[in-house]
Image (spheres, rainbow, N blue to C red):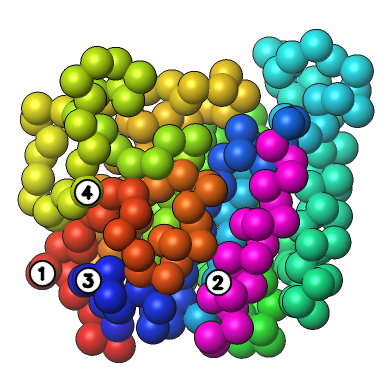
């Protein structure tokens, strides 16, 4: 089915939720529990939920006694190797409260471009969902290279949503919605609805986030939202703290309407 109105969100068959590094690492690691609460609520009404989670490198940094995000590839891979383990433990520890089991899925850009790897990833996630397992997807930073990587998990989330034919993609951020200009600037106005053919010509979109921890920003989220919406998947862009409201279909964030000529009937 295609979700073309917020009122239909609670009845979505399959939802992909993407959360960024800044929302679930460092001082914000405590946001994992309320995020899991929201995912579990959707899971409890038989919605199939896939979480695309950044944060492996950011989570691993303190364990490597580093002062900030490493710039060299080898240290990034080392931080990811440590951080991914800790991150999945934290998610599973929180999911245990609901009796939900997580399944880890690590992908590279090459996997999504290779037809065989892509088919294998889709088959694995379809089986996990059929078994009522909650897939947690991240870029495989330990083997990804600078030349072959998604660049940000917003793009990965859009590709996953298309891969599994998700009805809805929820892109979480450290801001509550898309604005006409960076929200910290005077005169910035919240945009509640973006039509599938809206070019957003009068919108000033920044390319980086506010925290300095992640790699994405409003620009990557708008690009990902457009990619998904063009293929018939509705998109909500909002703050991580508003994920429960978003998954209930409440009026939060920015709604990207799906393209009408791509609407799915099943």
Q: Secondary structure at mark 1?
A: helix
Q: In the image, what residue occupies the spot 42% across and 30% down? A: 217
| Alpha-carbon span between mark 1 and mark 4 | 22 Å
Residue assigned mark 4: 192
Which quarter shows the N terminus?
bottom left
Q: Earlier in the sequence, mark 1 or mark 4?
A: 4
Q: Residues within 10 Å of mark 3 (few under 14, many from 20)?
A: few
Q: Position of residue 169 (x, y in %)?
A: 40, 60
Residue 64, image quadrant: top right
Residue 141 seen by the camera = no
Examine the rendered structure and indicate whether residue 266 appears above or below residue 240.
below
Residue assigned mark 2: 49
Which quarter shows the C terminus?
bottom left
Q: Earlier in the sequence, mark 1 or mark 2?
A: 2
Q: In the image, what residue occupies the spot 22% across and 71% down? A: 5
Residue assigned mark 3: 5
Residue 45 among those drawn in magenta? yes
Q: Earlier in the sequence, mark 3 or mark 4?
A: 3
Q: In the image, what residue occupies the spot 55% across and 35% down? A: 149
Residue assigned mark 1: 261
Q: Is residue 54 left or right of residue 66?
A: left
Residue 181, image quadrant: top left
* Residue situated in front as seen by the camera: 235 or 177: 177
* Residue situated in front as seen by the camera: 236 or 250: 250
| Alpha-carbon span between mark 2 and mark 4 | 24 Å
Q: Secondary structure at mark 3?
A: loop
What range is drawn magenta here? 28-46
Q: Earlier in the sequence, mark 1 or mark 3?
A: 3
Q: Earlier in the sequence, mark 3 or mark 2?
A: 3
């Amino acid at each position: 089915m295609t979700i073309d109105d917020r009122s239909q969100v609670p009845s979505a068959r399959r939802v992909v939720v993407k959360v960024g590094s800044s929302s679930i690492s460092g001082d914000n690691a405590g946001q994992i529990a309320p995020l899991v609460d929201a995912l579990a609520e959707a899971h409890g009404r038989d919605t199939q939920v896939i979480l695309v989670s950044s944060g492996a490198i950011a989570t691993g940094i303190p364990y490597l006694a580093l002062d900030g995000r490493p710039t060299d590839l080898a240290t990034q891979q080392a931080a990811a190797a440590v951080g991914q383990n800790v991150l999945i433990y934290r998610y599973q520890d929180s999911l245990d409260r609901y009796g939900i089991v997580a399944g880890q899925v690590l992908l590279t850009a090459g996997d999504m471009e290779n037809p065989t790897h892509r088919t294998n990833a889709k088959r694995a996630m379809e089986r996990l969902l059929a078994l009522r397992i909650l897939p947690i997807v991240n870029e495989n930073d330990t083997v990804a290279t600078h030349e072959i990587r998604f660049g940000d998990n917003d793009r990965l989330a859009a590709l996953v949503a298309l891969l599994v034919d998700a009805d809805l993609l929820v892109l979480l951020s450290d801001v509550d919605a898309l604005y006409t200009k960076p929200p910290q600037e005077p005169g910035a106005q919240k945009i509640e609805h973006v039509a599938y053919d809206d070019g957003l010509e009068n919108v000033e979109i920044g390319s980086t986030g506010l925290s300095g921890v992640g790699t994405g920003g409003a620009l990557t989220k708008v690009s990902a939202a457009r990619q998904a919406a063009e293929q018939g998947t509705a998109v909500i862009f909002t703050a991580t703290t508003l994920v429960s409201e978003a998954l209930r279909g409440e009026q939060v964030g920015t709604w990207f309407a799906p393209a009408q000529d791509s609407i799915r009937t099943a």
